[in-house]
Image (cartoon, rainbow, N blue to C red):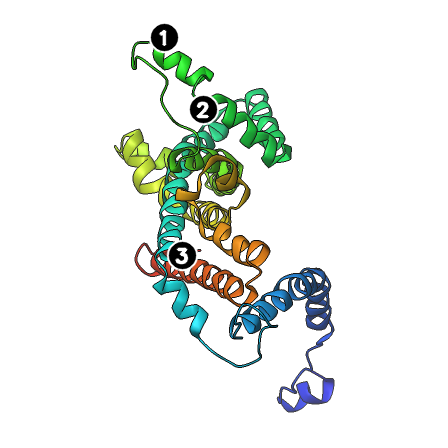
Amino acid sequence: MTDAGAASGVTLPVRRRSGGRSRRWLLIACMLGPLLGFMVVFYAVPFAYLAQESFQSWDGEDEPKAEPTFDYYKKTFQSSRTSRALTRTFRISLVSTLIALVICYPVALLLIRAGPRLRSGMLLVIFISLAASLIVRNYGWLVVLADQGPLNALLVGLGFTSRGLRMVYSEGATIVALVHYVMPFMILPIYGALLRIPDSYSEASISLGAGPWTTLRKVVFPLSMPGVFGGTILSFAICMSAFVTPLMLGSPATAMMSQVAAEQLLVQQNFPWGSAIVTILTLATFAVVFAYGWVIRRVMKADV
């Protein structure tokens, strides 16, 4: 307000500088620009090409014809093999994610309550497992779950069975390997969410008469829902798109959707049908993720 304005008792408008806001948006653009550019070039554009390819028709001899058709989408749901593979993919992904959550949430709690040395050692093991090759892990599970492997030898030695069980090349073996693979992706988001919960919340709950289990169920777990949401979304998406693990530890009878798509694209070279399968798998994964997020926000009232 100027002297003249003060003398006359009139407050003059003050112009706000927009330089700070512009710099903030410029900083956000610089931080997100490379990521968005990468996603557009290496994900959005190839996916758009696949989606366009899926609407073409192909007679098995000539090049695919640019005639829009939904035949391959109908064929995907009408074919017993692809429909079973889609159902199996959802089942394996859901079971693997739930098992990983049950195993990894206590591990994240232990990380919070562990001493500095134990916490550092556990985090080191988690990061090392992230660096391990997926193929090496799967070969390890092939050895462990083999008919004459150490797990079968242990079961026979303890008297649980008289002979080795058939565990490899099955849906169960695929689930075990997928759970092992997604554990770091489940533990780290939950651990990060638990770190942000003040200790005073648990202390206040206990001082008001709540037991440890009640405190965990009604205080800690709801506040850690952002981490649970992130971990389950990552794990589910990884399992839905798994290819190498079911290929090595499963069988043709337990093939997942990615294997069916690879067969059409690489073996049969039926690019329209393979593209339709990939498009359906991608859209189905996004639909589950958005539906899950809606349930978490609206029903459980979690801030995710």
Circle 3 residue: 82
Please, what is the three-letter code of the amino acid marked with disc 1?
Answer: Gly
Q: Which of marks 3 and 1 is nearer the N terminus?
A: 3
Give the crowd class for mark 3: few <14, some 14-19, many >=20 residues within 10 Å.
Answer: some
Residue nearest the observer in this picture, 282 or 143: 143
Which dot, 3 or 1, sits closer to the camera? 3
Q: Nearer the viewer, residue 144 or 204?
A: 144
Hey, which quadrant is residue 99 in on the image? top left
Read off the residue under disc 1.
157
Question: Marks 3 and 2, how far apart in space?
Answer: 28 Å
Vertical order, 165 against 181 (above or below):
above
Question: For residue 145, which numbered disc appears in the image?
Answer: 2
- Please tell me which residue lies in front, 155 or 252: 252
- Against 1, residue 110 (above or below) is above
| Extreme residue toward the front, this view | 61
> Can residue 191 be seen by looking at this rendering?
no
Percent of width and height locating residue 304: 44, 55
Residue 115 vertical position relative to residue 189 in the rendered view, above or below: above
How far across and down, in percent of the image, does residue 244 sit? 55, 42
Contact, CB < 8 Å: mark 3 with mark 1?
Answer: no
Which element carries disc 2, helix, strand or loop? loop
Element at label 3: helix
Three-letter amino acid code at the position of disc 3: Thr
Residue shown at 73% from the left, 85% from the top? 3
CB atoms at circles 2 and 1 under 8 Å apart?
Answer: no
